[in-house]
Image (cartoon, rainbow, N blue to C red):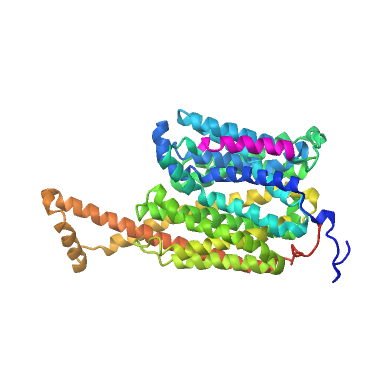
């Protein structure tokens, strides 16, 4: 390629963005937004869905788990499907199936129907996410990545962040059924637009002649079992529960068979050799940790606001909206920074911002409210975008075009697995540390201590009108306060753990080679 000179020269055709491709790509991005949004959109409305379907407390978490387990299987498979059937057919069928299953979820009359529809919705719709990432790095020249990367980065991080907000508002304003019905009209429009406008590549049906069914089944068992164990383990004392133990064993067996097939099959279902590229491997690791920050903190803040502050779903959504707002305004800034700033420094700065936000949260008390968590939320929103854009560019932007479809599935899988592992660790740490702090508080609240007795008498004075029940009510109140304080201290411990994680990862930039700048004029893959 000719080198740039001081003389003004015409912009080569390959360096411009074709308007038809851009419109088609934007339609795909919106489809990806719907698929990612649906991961979290039900989280704030599970009680209402439970009541509407007559489900038990043990059954209702499967409305979310079924979607996650099914989606995590499709994400790495989508690379093979888009190579075999083309981007057009893979995305259009994925979006159409997602739309149909969204409608079916809204019409579900019992929990079994809902779980089946949600699993199909997650599995079929999961193909949209990596297909968009792959398209972004194959149809647009590298010099335009500063425009395209922030767009997909914003959608990939904003959708799960605002999911609980959107879900809470829809359920309060209309009903939980509209969590799913709202996808129907946009889904039809996106399906028609992508089918009629996407012509980025051609199918290669010859790949189907060597389709690795053993690899597909073992991958489904491996990833599905792993996702189930990570979702259910923290709440069921891990291997003490038979289903968790069984799924963990199945995941281990599936992993052995899957990795054997990757090495031995003529046409493996997933090509792991992309990890031989140092930047892709490190970028995937960073994506994994980013998943912890994205999904872990999206989970932690609402749990605190609901469990300690007593917020309802709408109040939580309004409080959490700050993060989404910061991400929205930071996206174009992050895109422009990639033109001039070493992306490794951006990644380090993003993780330091994460660490600063979680460090502030280590001082949390039971009376922290909107203004106390405002700065940590701002830091989180800004840091997500500062990290996401260069991580995507480093992981996918230096790969040859032929490898991007497969690599995109692996990259997105790592982010989702990071979220799953992060949530499992966070939940386990939260439970264990709360038990530890409650035990220590129980030892400290000793009836021989004057200040304990004084507190007890002061509290009892508020219940004297209840006569003989006053003593029991006072003890119950005291135990409730101890549990609340133990939970708050557990939150502080978890935020400290996350601070250490993000702080250490900020040094990961030394593992990366400096990639070509997005604005450097390079148009092709490397």
Q: Position of residue 417 (x, y in %)?
A: 59, 50
Q: Residue at x 13, y 49 (%)?
A: 466
Looking at the image, which is closer to me, 136 or 233?
136
Of all residues, the one furthest to the bottom in this rendering is: 6
Image: 78 above or below 308? above
Residue displayed at 47% across by 35% down: 177
Looking at the image, which residue sits at the far right?
Answer: 2
Q: Residue 493 location in percent, x, y? A: 44, 63
Depth check, front residue: 490 or 18: 18
- Residue 92 on image: x %, y %: 68, 36
Seen in the image, is 438 located left or right of residue 85?
left
Task: Give the vertical position of 277 relative to 88 (above or below).
Answer: below
Examine the structure image and report whether residue 225 is included in the region drawn in magenta: no
Q: Which residue is painted at 56% across and 63% down in the image?
A: 382
Residue 91 quadrant: top right
Q: How many marks are shown on the rendered structure?
A: 0
Whether residue 101 appears in this view of the structure is yes
Which quarter of the rendering shows the N terminus? bottom right
Q: Quadrant of the C terminus?
A: bottom right
* Residue 451 appears left or right of 336: left
Q: What secondary structure characterizes most of the magenta part?
A: helix
- Residue at 79% over, 42% down: 201
Write down the region rendered in magenta.
180-197
């Amino acid at each position: 390629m000719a080198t740039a000179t001081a003389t003004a020269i015409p912009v080569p055709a390959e360096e411009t963005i074709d308007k038809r491709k851009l419109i088609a790509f934007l339609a795909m991005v919106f489809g990806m937004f719907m698929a990612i949004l649906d991961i979290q959109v039900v989280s704030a409305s599970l009680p209402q869905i439970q009541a509407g379907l007559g489900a038990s407390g043990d059954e209702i978490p499967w409305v979310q788990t079924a979607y996650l387990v099914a989606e995590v299987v499709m994400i790495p498979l989508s690379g093979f499907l888009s190579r075999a059937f083309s981007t057009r057919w893979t995305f259009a069928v994925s979006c159409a199936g997602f739309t149909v299953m969204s409608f079916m979820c809204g019409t579900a009359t019992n929990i079994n129907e809902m779980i089946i529809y949600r699993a199909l919705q997650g599995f079929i719709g999961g193909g949209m996410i990596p297909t968009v990432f792959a398209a972004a790095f194959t149809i647009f020249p590298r010099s335009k990545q500063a425009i395209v990367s922030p767009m997909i980065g914003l959608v990939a991080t904003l959708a799960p962040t605002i999911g609980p907000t959107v879900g809470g508002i829809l359920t309060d304003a209309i009903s939980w059924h509209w969590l799913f019905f709202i996808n129907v009209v946009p889904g039809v429009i996106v399906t028609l637009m992508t089918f009629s406008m996407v012509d980025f590549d051609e199918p290669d049906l010859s790949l189907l002649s060597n389709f690795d069914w053993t690899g597909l089944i073992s991958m489904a068992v491996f990833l599905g079992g792993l996702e189930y164990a990570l979702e259910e383990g923290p709440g069921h004392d891990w291997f003490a529960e038979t289903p968790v133990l069984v799924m963990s064993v199945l995941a281990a067996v599936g992993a052995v068979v899957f990795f054997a097939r990757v090495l031995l099959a003529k046409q493996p279902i997933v090509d792991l050799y992309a990890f031989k590229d140092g930047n892709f491997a490190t970028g995937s690791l960073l994506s994994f940790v980013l998943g912890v920050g994205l999904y872990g903190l999206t989970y932690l803040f609402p749990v605190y606001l609901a469990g300690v502050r007593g917020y309802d779903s709408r109040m939580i959504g309004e409080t959490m909206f700050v993060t989404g707002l910061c991400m929205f305004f930071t996206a174009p800034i992050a895109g422009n920074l990639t033109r001039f700033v070493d992306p490794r420094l951006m990644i380090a700065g993003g993780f330091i911002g994460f660490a600063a936000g979680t460090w502030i949260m280590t001082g949390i008390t039971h009376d922290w409210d909107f203004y106390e968590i405002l700065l940590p939320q701002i830091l989180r929103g800004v840091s997500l975008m500062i990290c996401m854009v260069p991580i995507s560019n480093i992981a996918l932007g230096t790969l040859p075009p032929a490898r991007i479809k497969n690599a995109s599935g692996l990259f997105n899988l790592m982010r989702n697995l990071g979220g799953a592992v992060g949530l499992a660790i966070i939940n386990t740490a939260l439970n264990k540390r709360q038990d530890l702090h409650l035990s220590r508080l129980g030892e400290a609240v000793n009836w021989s201590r004057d200040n304990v007795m004084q507190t007890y008498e002061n509290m009892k004075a508020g219940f004297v009108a209840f006569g003989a029940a006053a003593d029991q009510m006072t003890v119950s109140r005291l135990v409730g306060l101890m549990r609340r304080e133990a939970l708050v201290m557990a939150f502080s411990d978890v935020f400290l753990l996350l601070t250490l994680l993000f702080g250490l990862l900020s040094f990961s930039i030394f593992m990366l080679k400096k990639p070509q700048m997005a604005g450097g004029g390079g148009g092709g893959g490397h």
